[in-house]
Image (cartoon, rainbow, N blue to C red):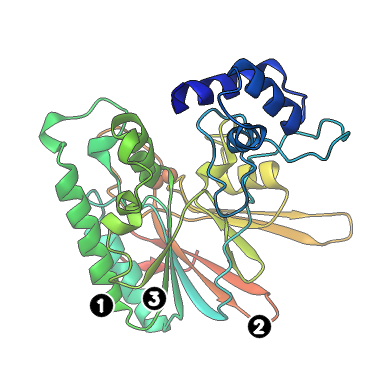
Amino acid sequence: MAGDDITRMAIEIIRQYPDHPARSLARRLVEAANGALTLDAARSRIRQQLGQCGVKNRKRPASGLERQARSPGEGVAMPASRAAPWAPYDPQLVGLWGVLSDIHVPYHSEVALKAAVEHLKLQKIVGLLLNGDIADFYSISRYVKNPANRDFGNELAQVRQLLKWLRGEFPGVKIIYKQGNHEERYQVWLWQHAAELSLQPEMNLEVWLQCNIYDIAMVGDQLPVMLGKLPVLHGHEKGGGMTAPVNQARGAFMRLHHTVLEGHGHRTSGHCEPDMFGNETFCWSTGCLADLRPEYARLNKYNWGFATVDVQADGSFNVQNMRITKDGVVRSS
Ligand SMILES: [Fe+2]
Ligand SMILES: [Fe+2]
């Protein structure tokens, strides 16, 4: 009897008797195989399928039948959870940070980006947070696309050029690149078009963008980035249902009930919510650094902007939400 047949029988028996301990499943396997294998061999075949072959060899069985090991007489255990921990990314760096978002390379505004970068250089920042939608990734979006602009290789090259330029402008500064919904287009595209390759480490976006060369830490999985006690989101993490509030910062407060700074809406806004004892919760949204007349929304209410966040050793912070005029002048409100 071939090994594959025995494995198939083991899987069938486990499916048929999901509550039985491994030893009794092994006995059934020996029976079903007409004694073609010993009880010990049958037990290890069963344990392989249950994912119970020790930490070192614990590959997830393809059959998806893994479960916790049980002692004889022990009842059925709760199923193992596949939920992964989700915790904010905390660079733990005190000092002045710059926050740039929604650059949308190659549809960025050279005027706005230059103004923001010049301002941050004068401020002598210690950290730079690229807060999502830094790349547009137009050519791999799921929307209908202009065939003239479907050159993903060129888009990647331009984002790499941006990162290289920023590293040159800010030598020695900690740079974090948090993914926004436009960067997530890459993962979606990969799963749809090259699922077999998607788990290879070479396929990670940070590898394509050469983040290691420019010493840039990429943060994915929609994790908030903590600047002291201030959580920073791109803004798409909150999901649908409040996509276009009149005031984005108020919309963020209504969803999160916590102070937050976010981008994504391409509009500068702020909202202060005091409680009955006068404790204030403040939320901010930053403007964008992209073309203000994109082809998908020629007329809109977008504005240019960015923020600085001064982080103290005790985690307290001071946000300055800056606007940039159409002439490239930086304004403090
Ligand atoms: Fe954006
Ligand atoms: Fe966005």
What is the x, y in percent for residue 59?
53, 44
Callout 1: few (<14), some (14-19), or many (20+) C-alpha neighbours within 10 Å?
few
Left-right relation of 241 to 321: right
Q: Which residue has dot 2 on it? A: 313
Q: Which residue is at the front of the view, 127 or 246?
A: 127
Q: Is residue 144 above or below residue 131?
A: above
Measured from the top left, where is residue 22 in percent x and y?
72, 32
> In the rendered structure, which amino acid carries the disc numbered 3?
Leu
Residue 120 image label: 3
Check contact, mark 1 vs mark 3: CB within 8 A: no
Point out residue 122 in the picture as x, y percentages from the top left corner. Answer: 37, 83
* 298 relative to 5, above or below: below
SS of the residue at dot 3? helix
Label 2: state its secondary structure. Answer: loop
Location of residue 10 by image quarter: top right
Report crowding for label 2: few under 14, some 14 to 19, many 20 or more residues within 10 A (C-alpha).
few
Which dot, 3 or 2, sits closer to the camera? 2
Sequence-first tag of 1 and 2 = 1
Q: Residue at x 66, y 18 (%)?
A: 31
Residues at circles 3 and 2 in contact by the CB criterion of under 8 Å: no
Q: Nearer the viewer, residue 325 or 24?
A: 24
- Tell me which amino acid carries mark 1: Gly
Per the image, label 1 sits on a secondary structure element best described as helix
Numbered label attached to residue 168: 1
- Amino acid at pointer 2: Ala
Spatial CA span between label 1 and label 2: 28 Å
Q: 287 or 19, which is in the foreground?
A: 19
Whole-angstrom CA distance, mark 3 to mark 2, is 21 Å
| 3 or 2: tag closer to the N-terminus | 3
